[in-house]
Amino acid sequence: MKVKYSRDVDILTVWLSDDPFDHAEETEGIITHFSAAGKPVLLEIQGAREFLLSSLTSLLKDEEVSKP
């Protein structure tokens, strides 16, 4: 797994595999790229700074994490 944060566009990119991706779906600011077999290959989290801060706060409070 590889992770990269792009500050200029506030996107966190998470490579889950080296498989080539075939298509993508977006849900609530998270773009998931899938292989031809339907396996998640890459995640792009838009608004990553707020998402990560909310996630850390939720973890400390032992709450469910959701995309703002």
Image (cartoon, grey):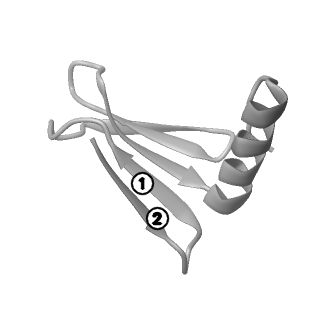
Res. 23 image quadrant: top left
Give the percent coordinates (x, y) of residue 20.
16, 40
Amino acid type of disc 1?
Thr
Please identify the quadrant where the N terminus is shown: top left
Q: Residue furthest left?
A: 19
Q: Residue furthest top?
A: 37
Residue 40 as seen in the image, left or right of residue 19? right
Looking at the rendered structure, which numbered label has been put on residue 5? 2
Q: Residue furthest front?
A: 60
Mark carried by residue 27: none
Q: Position of residue 14 (x, y in %)?
A: 38, 47
Provide residue 38's location: percent of width, then percent of height.
Answer: 30, 20
Residue ID for mark 1: 13
- Residue found 50% across the figure and 44% down from its top: 31
Residue 4 in the figure: left or right of residue 48: left
How far apart, in angstroms, are the residues tagged by discs 2 and 1? 6 Å
Q: Are marks 2 and 1 in contact (CB under 8 Å)?
A: yes
How packed is label 1: few (under 14 Cα within 10 Å), some, or many (20 or more)? some
* Type of amino acid at the residue the image marks with label 2: Tyr
Hey, which residue is sitting farthest bottom in the picture? Answer: 8
Residue in the foreground of this view, choosing between 57 and 37: 57
Classify 10 Å Cα crowding around label 2: few (below 14), some (14-19), many (20 and above): some
Residue 66 visible in rendering:
no
Looking at the image, can residue 33 be seen?
A: yes
